[in-house]
Amino acid sequence: QVQLVESGGGLVQPGGSLRLSCAASGSIFSMNRMGWYRQAPGKQRDLVAVIANGGSTYYVDSVKGRFTISRDNAKNAVYLDLQMNSLKPEDTAVYYCNIYPSDRRFWGQGTQVTVSS
């Protein structure tokens, strides 16, 4: 079992930056790969970025060069960040963290990111 708590969202103007954080606790064996996901209004929840325990990363094309995923491992927890720069209105969504591939049992409340002038 994994517990996930996201934070750091907010309202930002286009071109601005935000840093999201996720505290993941529970089964460390389930947290080898962790991901950020997002769900825009009226759309399905999509993968944004993944980071493995060894530090390798993956980004979807739409965020490459703008977003950076990072993690800090503790004994029974993982602290996951998503640095988002050069934000665009199309980045507006609720952002979630989860293991990768995602497990529907673990979804948290997410954190709202709104990019608007």
Image (spheres, rainbow, N blue to C red):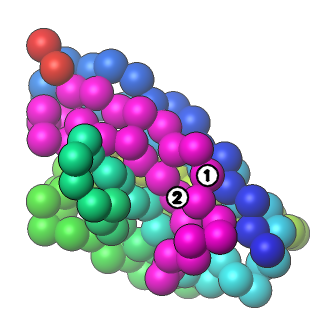
Which residue position holds label 2?
97
Q: Are marks 1 and 2 in contact (CB under 8 Å)?
A: yes
Quarter holding the N terminus is bottom right
* Residue 98 on the magenta segment: yes
Circle nearer the viewer, 1 or 2: 1
Q: What residue range appears in magenta?
A: 86-115
Identify which residue is drawn at 33% across, 19% down: 11
Q: Residue furthest front?
A: 42
Left or right of residue 103: residue 72: right
Q: Is residue 8 left or right of residue 40?
A: right
**Left or right of residue 28, residue 36 in this image:** left
Q: Label 1's element?
A: loop
Work out whether 34 lies above or below 114: below
Q: CA distance from mark 1 to mark 2?
A: 8 Å
Q: Quadrant of the C terminus?
A: top left
How busy is the neighbourhood of tag 1: few (under 14 within 10 Å), some, or many (20 plus)? Answer: some
In this picture, is 57 found above or below 73? Answer: below
Label disc, if present, on residue 108 of the rendered structure:
1
